[in-house]
Amino acid sequence: MTTARNDHDPITAEIIRNALIAITDEMKTNLMRTAYNPIIYEALDYTVGLFDANGDTVSIGLGLPMFIRGLSDAIKAKLEFYGRDGIEPGDILLTNDAYIMGSHLNHMIFTVPIFHDGEIVAFSSSMAHWIDIGGTLGARTQDIYSEGLQLPIVKIFKRGVQDDELTRIIRTNVRVPELAMGDFRAQIAAIRTGEQRYGALLNKYGLAAVNGSIAGVYALTERLARASVAAIPDGTYEAESYMDDDGITDARIPIRVKVIVAGDRMTIDLSDVSPQVQGYFNSGATAGRSAAQVAFKCVTTPTQYPINDGAFRNLDIILPPGRVVSATKPAAMRWWMTIPMTVVDTIFRALAPAIPDRVAAGHHADLCVGTMYGINPRTGRFYVGSTNPPGGGWGATAGSDGMSAVVCINDGDTHNAVLEALEAKNPIVIERYALRPDSGGPGKRRGGLGLELRVRAAAPMRTNVHVERTKCAPWGLNGGAEALPNRVHLERVGGETFSNGNGKLEGEPLKPGDVLVIESGGGGGYGNPNERSRATVADDVRNGYVTREAALRDYGMTEAELP
């Protein structure tokens, strides 16, 4: 790729920078509006992006922050596999290799090369979550082979012609092929949009101007990131947390991180994160690197767009293979997204003494979703459905209370699902969807509140729930208290309450009238609770965020001060 700078025309460079953002936004919108599955068009479980000729990120339209590395790493793997001369105009490359992209097999990655004057100059790519990719419906997977169809790097289109045999293999291995093929077409439409718009940009401004502008974007973002790190005191900062278990054994999963700041460079060392586990909470090295990059981006250049690889040139990541966030084959990876979230939170925790004004206390750090499957009595057909992430509490900061009922850091732009839409598509009734009083950690700045979600079965079904962090509560910072953790239980028709003692249910049968209850955790508090304004605590009680009992116990209020 030509890397000549376009220093003599900053106006054109700025126009091209904004055009790159606009292209990825259009790709993102097209995919959302044409996808068939609500996990894409409602939960926004996808990402799209433009990449340079080497596969480095130029502009990425994130639905989920943890996808920040998946596309780039997959494109680089595809380049290495075929070689630059082995990719032709009209080819579309596909894979869902969990150990390339770092996440589960449900993520299908389509990539189209962008040619100019007979040479590859860029790539347009998308990754999206298919609701089903085959494999066992049971949740307790212990290797990748039980989790669904594995596609190595293949050409699903060759010189513009769709490979019918590969397409039929995909259709045959999913339970609802009409939905899967709808998402297939939506992803291809999105990347072709990127290909067309990028080609128009090249035709208008020329390759040298576009490449020079991209080089300028990389350089500017790098300069800002270096300045931000340089403002952090040099030193080594460490923190730890843990996960409940791996879904198979009862052993805790330790999460230990080390952050080293030296001048304008930062090193995030994940060597002491737990080894890969027997159960299904592993993720690949791409996810581990994504966690480090998400944390780094949040504390250095959180509002600098487009998101591009220049932002990470002064970040070093130490991540040996075989860790729970750098797992190797055949590790199970069905619930890959959970542990990287806690890695991000733990990095913030480590940096809190150095940059207390740039980090937040711990958050609920889980999707808090349930999956249901069975025969839908309205259609007589098999279905797989899920509750969308309800959101939960985020940690408070030095300057503000934590946000309430906001999705976890993995899920970024995920929409708050329309409950009536969930009820229309699945045989369920949402009985309650409400804030969880007292779930936010007390502090001078109170943590955000979690939610209570009650889902009643309207037909016989089974449910899988993989909620974590029911024991490691979201922590407070600088004297703030911890929040209530996540919690899951069932309420049977006869009045019996059932829980496994953690947040996991594995193929649990539900009868009509049984209720699945998911309670998302709050966010940790920041600062001494006794320093919170008395009037603000009284308002919290008045609004139902804090009970009278908690105001008396946690904030030292008197009865006379309460409404």
Image (spheres, helix red, strand yellow):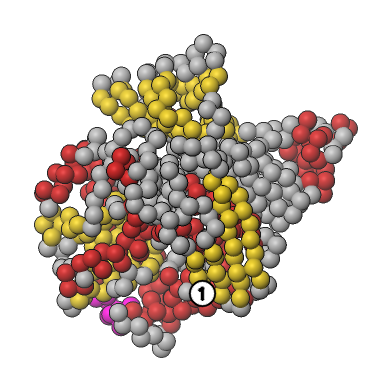
Most extreme residue toward the top is 494
Res. 225 image quadrant? bottom right
Name the image quarter holding the C terminus.
Answer: top right
For badge 1, the amino acid type reads Asn
Q: Tell me: residue 457, above or below residue 525.
A: above
Most extreme residue toward the bottom is 8
Q: Which residues are magenta?
A: 202-210
Q: Position of residue 512 (x, y in %)?
A: 42, 16
Q: Position of residue 324 (x, y in %)?
A: 46, 52
Specify the principal SS of the magenta part: helix
Q: Position of residue 247 (x, y in %)?
A: 46, 37
For the point 35% across and 64% down, which residue is it? 72
**Mark 1 Cα within 10 Å, few/some/many (few <14, many 20+)?**
some
Q: Tell me: residue 257, above or below residue 457.
A: below
Q: Is residue 223 magenta?
A: no
For the point 50% across and 49% down, which residue is it? 339
Res. 61 image quadrant? bottom left
Is disc 1 placed on a helix, strand or loop?
loop
Residue 40 in view here: no
Q: Is residue 209 magenta?
A: yes
Given residues 389 and 540, the one toward you in this image is 389
Left or right: 247, with 121 as reference point: right
For the point 54% across and 25% down, which residue is it? 499
For label 1, the residue is: 314
Q: Tell me: residue 216, above or below residue 246.
A: below
